[in-house]
Image (cartoon, rainbow, N blue to C red):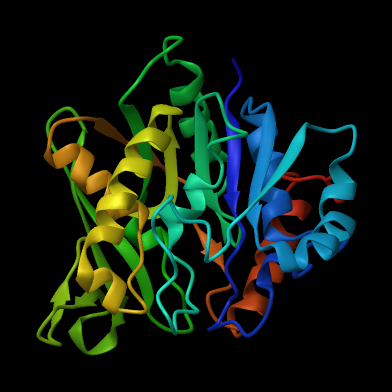
Amino acid sequence: MKPTLFLLAAGMGSRYGGLKQLDGLGPNGETIMDYSIYDAIQAGFGKIVWVIRKDFEEQFRTQILSKYQGQVPCELCFQALDALPEGFKVPEGRVKPWGTNHAVLMGKDVIKEPFCVINCDDFYGRDAFMQIGKFLSGLKEGSKNEYAMVGFRCCNTLSENGSVARGVCAYNEKRHLTDVVERTEILRQPDKGNAICYKDEQGEWQPLEENVPVSMNMWGFTPDYFEHSEAYFKEFLSDPKNMENLKAEFFIPLMVNKLINEGTSTVEVLDTTSKWFGVTYAADREATVERIKKLVEEGVYPNKLF
């Protein structure tokens, strides 16, 4: 069974200042997710699913879905604040979405095969899709609790226009993930020999190895992951501090850490030579347009994708 590509497209780009998911950056107005989908098809993926907000469904269908007609099967699902398990309701005053793993949960009714989760506004690169596609396609039918993530080399994931947030990963001798620690400020420090550093809990800058694997939210799961997520989301919502904190979020690394720490699941850390780029900041846009243009000129991508 061919794996499915699941794109998280429900978020607004607050730092970027708009719906960056729909920003045309390629020579014919292609979005970053168009390149991800092209790479995924090349890597053997057989279906594309997006999770979006209901309020931009019409624009999404017109601008995005229409171009894939006849290319690959596509489906939509929707993330909403009130999409909660029975017995729970949205706390008064909450407007922030419930986070990336809540978005993943929205796909449980349409995804029945191994799947890869990605952000729609990150450019992951062909090799990354080849690695995760090979892993998912190689799973035995009915496999459970054997997951993967693509561990990008930290030096290949930085922005020249500010700090980035990354999940810094540790793994054991089997390359199984043992920990993901979210570092919200990572950048090169000129006064430290241009070394990559992250800001710790005390506000101090600490060094990071150039090639330490970091999560770019590129995960490979099987459908049993939805069951784990449903159960743990109820625990998350039952914790008073998560209901009192109107910005508390149910993140993928939170779920993954629970599963690996209790020994329920394994997550293989896949290495990739791909270099990430994206539009974390508005100033990233020009450089991203130039990098895509260069890839087209080099023949990595056709001038018109679809």
Residue in the image at 39% along x and 28% along y: 224
Quarter of the image containing the N terminus?
Answer: top right
**Towards the viewer: 65 or 247:** 247
Left or right: residue 234 versus residue 35 is left
What is the x, y in percent for residue 256?
28, 45
**Towards the viewer: 53 or 180:** 53
Q: How many marks?
A: 0
Left or right: residue 23 versus residue 174 is right
Left or right: residue 253 versus residue 216 is left
**Towards the viewer: 242 or 103:** 242
**Towards the viewer: 1 or 89:** 89
Q: Is residue 25 visible?
A: no
Residue in the image at 83% along x and 49% along y: 65
Question: Which image quadrant is residue 240 in?
Answer: bottom left
Residue in the image at 19% along x and 30% along y: 264
Residue at the extreme top of the image, as rendered: 141
What is the x, y in percent for residue 291?
65, 64
In the displayed structure, would residue 201 be above or below residue 230? below
Quarter of the image containing the C terminus?
Answer: top right
